[in-house]
Amino acid sequence: MPPFLTIALTTLPALLFAAGMLHLLPRLGPPGKAITAWLAHAPGLDLIITYFTAAPMILGLIAGVQLHSGSPWLGALLGFVAAVCAQAAAIVLWTNAHEFANRKHVKGPRIVHVLNRVVGPFNNHAALWWSALAVPVFWIIRVAEYIVYPPLTWLVKFPKYNDAEWVNVSRHKFDGLVGHDLIWCLYCDWMTGLWSLGSEMLRNLESFWCPIRFHPTNKCENCKHDFPDVEDRWAPAESGMAEVVRRLEAHYPGPEGENSWWGHPTRLSVSAPKKDKPTDE
């Protein structure tokens, strides 16, 4: 059998089997429900996401190199493409099976029906699949949250976070959300949480190392939603390093406590410098 088919036909049943087990677990009584609950939050969810997204691609690359007798680069590419094709096929097969098992919900109100009318079926589905290209990027960001940020909590005393409060999924509990709508809503559920956690971590980095407003006013406006400190706590762009140092010394007075971003809840008892009128507008 050609290496491409070998990898694809090995990956596809492995993904479908795992999906079936996830459906079976809640029906195994309290132990199964406990495992299901653990898998819905980090770190359990990270294992599931890795199994369904990154692992097939990585293993496909490795298997492609080993199975292809010619160029290892061509083998790696074919192995990667075979794994991605298997992932796409698994989504399509699971979607149809889940909708077949939930016919009453399929006939009811659905997100996909509304958006198909808004932008057209082709545009809606093509855009969804195109957005899946970001999955490896989000997975890498999640790995960075595990590797890069934790050492900073003891090196410079950044606050620690309970990842499970951010990285989790719950939309599978929503009544009537099935098949196509469910799989893409779970994608957004996972993506939104890990991105928000990453933004929270970045707030600590920015306010600690670079508390200087951006010179273009519109960039400050665009960034203030993700970095609230930029609006009135960072040093104005037209000030000097003395002002930056003054603010750093005011907000990070000593080795005690956490060095969180200046608007963090742990800062409620910390007095910030008086709000300055931006000078770069």
Image (cartoon, rainbow, N blue to C red):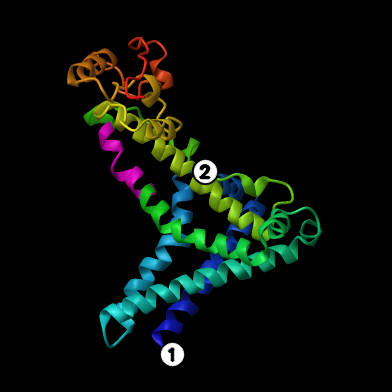
Asked if one can make out residue 157 in the rendered structure from this viewpoint, the answer is no
The image quarter in which residue 195 lies: top left
* Dominant secondary structure (helix, strand or loop) of the stretch shown in magenta: helix
Q: Which residue is mark 2?
A: 168
Q: Amino acid at mark 1?
A: Met
> Residue at left 49%, top 79%?
9
SS for dot 2: loop
Inter-mark Cα distance, 1 to 2: 40 Å
Residue closer to the observer: 107 or 226: 226
| Residue 29 x %, y % | 65, 49
Q: Earlier in the sequence, mark 1 or mark 2?
A: 1
* Magenta region: 142-152
SS for dot 1: loop
| Residue 135 x %, y % | 45, 57
| Residue 142 x %, y % | 39, 48
Q: Which residue is mark 1?
A: 1
